Amino acid sequence: MLGRDHHPPTEKLRLFSSPLAQRDFDDSATDRIPLSTGDKDVEHGPKDGARDQEYPLLKRYTEPTLQEVFFDLFFSSNYSVFSDTQKVTNHSRFKAYIGYFCLLWLTWFLVTLFDVRYVTDSIFSRITRAIQLGVLVGFVVVAPKFDPTDQHAGTMRTMSIILAVSRACLAVEYGSTLLHLRNYRKTRKPLYVQMGMHIAASAVYLGIAFRFRDSRKSTVFVIWYIISAIEAVGSVILSNFSPVLSLTPTHLMKRLTLLTVMIMRDSIITLAKEVVTIVRHPDAWDSTTIGLVTAAVATIYFVFLIYFDCRRASNYLPALRQQLWATLHLPFHLALVLHLQSFTQWLLWAKIWSQVRRLTDFSNPSEEAFIMTATSTMVKDQINASVQHFFADYPVKSPAVVGTINDALTNITEIPDKFWPVLSKFATTGNSEGIASSPEIEDSFATFLQSVVVVVTSLSNILFTAFGIEIKDKVGAKKSIVEELADSRSEAVQFQVQEKIWSHCRLVFAYGYVAAGCTILLMTTLAIIARTRPFTIWPIVRFATFIFLAIGTGLTALLWYDEAKVADFIQSPWVLPTITFVWFVVLIMTHLNGRSSWQVNADAWDQTMGSLGNRYWQLLQKPCLQKLIDVQPGCKILDLATGNGLASRYLASRGATILATDGVPEMLEYCRRRCTAEEAEHMTYRLLDVTKREAFESLLESQDATQGFDVVLINMAIMDIETLDPLADALPRLLKKNGIFVATMLHPVFFTSGARRFVQVVTHPGTGEEVSIRGKLVSEYLNVAPWKGVINKEEPAFQLQVYFHRPLHELLGTFFQRGLVMDAMKEPAFTEAQSQGNNTQLPPIMAFRLRRFS
């Protein structure tokens, strides 16, 4: 879709603001720019000069506006509040968590789909935005009691009304857009359909609100999820049928990226809270804690790097790939929040298990030296002293727990004194004959063992409370299970608490590992969808490895079914570092590159170009360089992406001193081989990747760049380069004063835009004969995703190469922003004699010269 990067001047806030990029139109068709559908075989343009048959030109923003960012912050804060108030503690809470997040995310997504296409700043838009923010506040209100399994009728009704208000507001916003676009007939039907979908959804949500009653449980809430999904999928599908609804030229991908960052930000906040909880207690900063905190921080950082490294190529994709990439962010974000929440919780669990081991040590005195001559009272006093020391570290909140522990200690005093030497021998040798020597000793052993278990269990429950581990039987309960059951002095109750805590711990482990595996799998899928370069053997191996690691990580949760093994693993310090190690492997493999397409193509390229070059070099590129570069003896030239050295060798033959560079070692080798002895005297070589800032920094610090260059040249390579910023930033420092930067490239309008050739047969007005007219059809220009194309159709050895299209304002603006000034530009075309089927009026390449004046 053709759009315009719109940065309007500051103006008075109006009641309404139009999403149209041009507020006023004349009757000339040349002043009205039609929108492209994204389908290169379909053309939408003015017919019969009638305005209402055209598509409008809409405002387009390259970055999210402040209104959008503020809305995303509200979403992020909302999800954070729900995560804090409704932690996943059992299967019911797990299902409620997923349901709540899906409703919240889909509501955000539907609002975002409107924003990225039609967002404006006006009194009306601020009012509707306030309503949508109010909807998010409503989500916060229902969060504490939201549980479809254990329904609170008021909460469920409120949620349904909130959804109805949100969709009604969206319908009004689309209606406002329709009002602004009413003069464009083709925009009406798509917007009517979009409005109708939200109106119908709002009516359904409002209708089912009255189905929730305190007297009975209703499953009608499932309609929330079904209708929300239909709205989201329907909106995405509709975007393919009308340019006015198209998502392709919007900043939707940037909005989703921004939301991902905010989710990671919330995980960092949660991590910080967990660290604060840990350090409030004594002996917090041991080696294990430091290692686990480091692993947690590293994991978040690795996830951040991998996510952005996998999508750094472009913020725009072809329509279907963009839509699939966007919709997959729902399961990706869900898996990500569960993954990040579980492993941040594991910081607490790891610390808890280390303290539980401490409890086990001091509660069992059987290996102590004094036990051989101890009395029962001495053993009881020894254990009690350790218990009191523990109470000093972790103050007890429930007198009932103290009573339970005192009862257990009292039972120890009833054990005969002759039992302790027998226990010491058993602890030392492992021989149980002494324990079974008499019924009295056997009963004493059972009493001792029971007392120790009660003490350890009770103290463990105090520990769980101290670290904020709260488990509630139902949503909205004022006390956790730990607090409720701990109020009882019963030993059995303390075991119930322990069992529920243990079950919670296993659940966190299981869903955490499954979520980690899903996160890796979905991130890999997103990377595959967003990939703009051809798939070679190494990327395939890399993605296959990621999928294998994802499946392996998820399957680790199967330990859930083996209580002994899961207990050993959970109580070890390796739960968190294992996940960190997996992410580290993914990060390293993300940056291990196999052979690039240019490495694969190097031999075929050299064979095709040879020493003299092809027609494009001889007839178009070389003449341009002759006109744009005035080579003087001793002229110092930096040739970037030299290939097999066509331009370098030509300029060296004219007396220039050349530094030939390329990011592909094979290309530099071919450049060396092609040089004659005379040319070689003027040439040096350097490996340099123009997409890497560090490569330019290294060059600038080297002797090669001393006193700068008279000319920096990049011949027919700009369209192959993913990012121009490192080059543009380095140019002012590479060039001498009055030095020039010269570039040749495939023409952005007639080639890299994806323009298609056509032949039109017409009747000659003078002779009446039928003649063929060759031309090119350009349906997209401003926003064209990277695309794969052949380098030479006649050479099957070539692998597909990725082309990066940039409109002229973006291409030249990149260098203008660095202070360079353009003083020459060429658009050469083949003559009729040279054409061989090429259009003589449409230049296949473009060349320009920029100069550094200061």
Image (tube, helix red, strand yellow):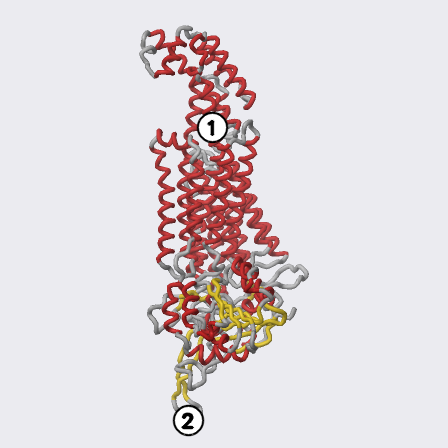
Query: 84 or 836: nearer the eye?
Result: 836
Above or below 846: residue 574: above
**Quick one: label 2 or label 1, which is nearer the N terminus?**
1
Q: Is residue 177 above or below residue 420?
A: below
Residue 601 visible? The answer is yes
Is residue 772 left or right of 400 when viewed as pictured? left
| Disc 1 residue crowd, few under 14, some 14–19, many 20+, Cα 10 Å | some
Q: Amino acid at mark 2?
A: Thr
Which mark's residue is nearer the viewer, 2 or 1?
Answer: 1
Q: How many marks?
A: 2
Give the SS element for disc 1. helix
Near mark 2 (Cα within 10 A), the count class, few <14, some 14-19 or many ≥20, is few
Residue type (three-letter) at the residue carrying disc 1? Ser
Asked if residue 661 lies left or right of residue 820, the reply is: left
Mark pair 2, 1: CA separation:
97 Å
- Examine the rendered structure and indicate whether residue 184 appears above or below residue 565: below
- Residue at left offset 57%, top offset 30%: 280
Expressed as whole percent of the image width and height from the top left, the position of residue 678 reads 46, 75
Work out which quarter of the rendered image holds the C terminus and state it: bottom right
Q: Residue at x 41, y 70 (%)?
A: 673
Residue on which disc 2 sits: 767
The percent coordinates of residue 101 (x first, y second) are: 47, 44
Q: Is residue 458 above or below residue 233?
A: above
Q: Secondary structure at mark 2?
A: loop
In the rendering, at what x and y percent does residue 319 appear? 44, 62
The front one of 338 and 377 is 377
Q: Which residue is at 63% across, 58% downward? A: 122
Q: Which mark is residue 354?
A: 1
Q: Which mark is residue 602?
A: none
Q: Extreme right residue here?
A: 12
Q: Position of residue 415 (x, y in %)?
A: 42, 8
Q: Examine the rendering and report whether any part of residue 227 can be seen.
A: no
